[in-house]
Image (cartoon, helix red, strand yellow):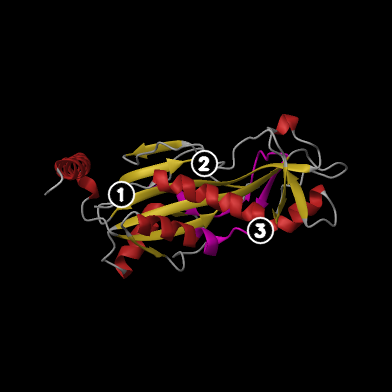
Amino acid sequence: MINLMSLTQLFLAITVLSVSASCVQLSDREYVQDNPQYQGVKRVVVFLQRWPGYLQLSNQSNLSEGFIKKGTHFLGPWEKAAVMAPRALDIRDIDDTLIGEVLLEALTSKGYQPFLAEALPGPAAAPLSVAAIMDQYQVMDSGTDAFLFCFYAPTLYLSHPPVGQATPGNRSYSLLEAINLVDAGSQGVTWAGPRAALAPKNSISHGFIYISMTVFKAPDQNMLWEVAGSQTGGRTRPWIPQCPPGPTDQNYWADVGIIQTLMVNNLKCRLRHLIPNAF
């Protein structure tokens, strides 16, 4: 004899799944209808440019100052930064190869087919705008659906400027060099859990990879979405949770591998929420 309770439970389960699927489809349908400019955008060419914190462009002082526009000088020449944070170090361990892998992975997970541009066209000695780079690239590859331009700045913050030294901000440092600025000869350092004001002197207070990204649709070069520091524009679904590591009550020990992992995983977390889905 068929168990009536089992049939009822099965019916309820099927109903719940059907309603859930319908809600997802409706949500996706509304997203597609509200964002027709995203249709057909699958193949994305990524241009990366490292922005050391001790340098600036002639028309922009830092990567969070404004969004990347078609007129932005994506290629130099670079100038010495007018203002440098006394505790900030540019970290060279986190480079184009690593950031490129992170970006490609994030875009692929959202349904895109990304490709990293192997070389930026044009001479670095003269300013080259985003629009000029897109024009040159489209001549070489007309099958591109969109261009993503990204400035990135991996930055480590000491809890206090090194005692007896000039502000260490005029070059890039390896993570091991940064550790030794705090504790000479050491392989690790205290990562301060509390904010810098409460951090012990021989410690680091924060590590962060700043990013500025804009996606332009080819061939009309219209902007689809953009990010600059904590600013967002376009339909990026930009709600971002507190991606770890955040402030804590406790300090902990961190070596080169741990610091790099914390910084990169924080960026991966942010990208999951910043990059919209392809459809």
Of residue 44 and residue 276, the one placed in the foreground of this image is 276
**Label 3 or label 1, whichever comes before in sequence order:** 3
Taking the view exactly as shown, the residue that stands out farthest to the left is 1
Seen in the picture, residue 6 relative to 173 is either above or below; the reply is above
| Amino acid residing under circle 3 | Gly
Secondary element type, mark 3: helix
Residue 166 seen in the current view:
yes
Residue 222 counted in the magenta span: no
- Where is mark 2, residue-wise? 243
| Amino acid residing under circle 1 | Asn
Secondary element type, mark 1: loop
- Where is mark 3, residue-wise? 257
Taking the view exactly as shown, the residue that stands out farthest to the right is 164
Residue 91 seen in the current view:
no
* Nearest to viewer (mark 3 / mark 1): 3
Residue 225 percent across, percent down from the top left: 34, 44
Of residue 153 and residue 58, the one placed in the foreground of this image is 153
Taking the view exactly as shown, the residue that stands out farthest to the front is 1
Answer with left or right where residue 225 lies relative to residue 243: left
Q: Quadrant of residue 16?
A: top left
Q: Give the numbered dot on residue 277.
A: 1
Q: CA distance from mark 3 to mark 1?
A: 31 Å
Secondary element type, mark 2: loop
Q: CA distance from mark 1 to mark 2?
A: 20 Å
- The stretch in magenta equals 70-99
* Nearest to viewer (mark 1 / mark 2): 2
Q: How packed is label 2: few (under 14 Cα within 10 Å), some, or many (20 or more)? A: few
Residue 85 percent across, percent down from the top left: 68, 39
Please give the name of the residue rendered at 53% of the width and 64% of the height, measured from the top-left corner.
Answer: 97
